[in-house]
Image (cartoon, rainbow, N blue to C red):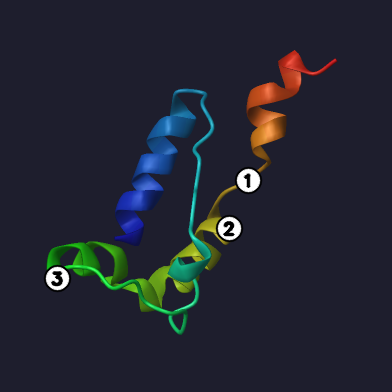
């Protein structure tokens, strides 16, 4: 649920760490072809997929995000 994702991001940020949000393109596009999976796996991958875009927009509005490069590799770039 969105509230749980927001809570998790907030907890990680309070520790001074950036949170990572990762999505497959198929998680944003409910019309993308579905994988032929057993029922349990299908439920894990596709339950609630119609709300993913709305959740992503809410997260982008509620938090500041940057790139992996800026957050994890800036100290190691030459």
- Residue pictured at 45% horizontal, 28% vertical: 14
- Determine which residue is flagged by label 2: 60
Q: Report helix, strand or loop for mark 2.
A: helix
Q: Residue furthest front?
A: 36
Which quadrant of the figure has residue 12?
Answer: top left
Q: Are marks 1 and 2 in contact (CB under 8 Å)?
A: yes
The residue pinned by badge 3 equals 39
Left/right of residue 66 with respect to residue 26 in the rendered view = right
Helix, strand or loop for disc 3: helix
Q: Which residue is mark 1?
A: 65
Q: Earlier in the sequence, mark 2 or mark 3?
A: 3
Q: Name the residue: 43% across, 41% down.
A: 9
Q: Say what secondary structure mark 1 lies in.
A: loop
Residue placed at 29% from the left, 60% from the top?
Answer: 1
Residue 5 left/right relative to 57: left
Earlier in the chain: of badge 1 and badge 2, it is 2
**Can you say which quadrant of the picture contains the C terminus?**
top right
Residue 43, x across and y down, in percent: 20, 68
Q: What separation in Å lies between label 1 and label 2 (alpha carbons)?
A: 7 Å
Residue 41 % position (x, y):
20, 62
Question: Could you tell me residue 71's position as x and y percent?
Answer: 65, 29
Up/down of 32 relative to 11, above or below = below
């Amino acid at each position: 649920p969105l509230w749980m994702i927001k809570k998790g991001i907030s907890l990680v940020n309070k520790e001074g760490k950036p949170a990572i949000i990762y999505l497959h393109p198929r998680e944003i596009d409910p019309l993308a072809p579905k994988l032929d999976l057993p029922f349990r796996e299908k439920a894990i991958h596709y339950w609630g997929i119609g709300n993913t875009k709305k959740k992503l927009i809410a997260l982008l509005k509620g938090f500041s995000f940057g790139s992996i490069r800026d957050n994890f590799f800036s100290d190691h770039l030459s």
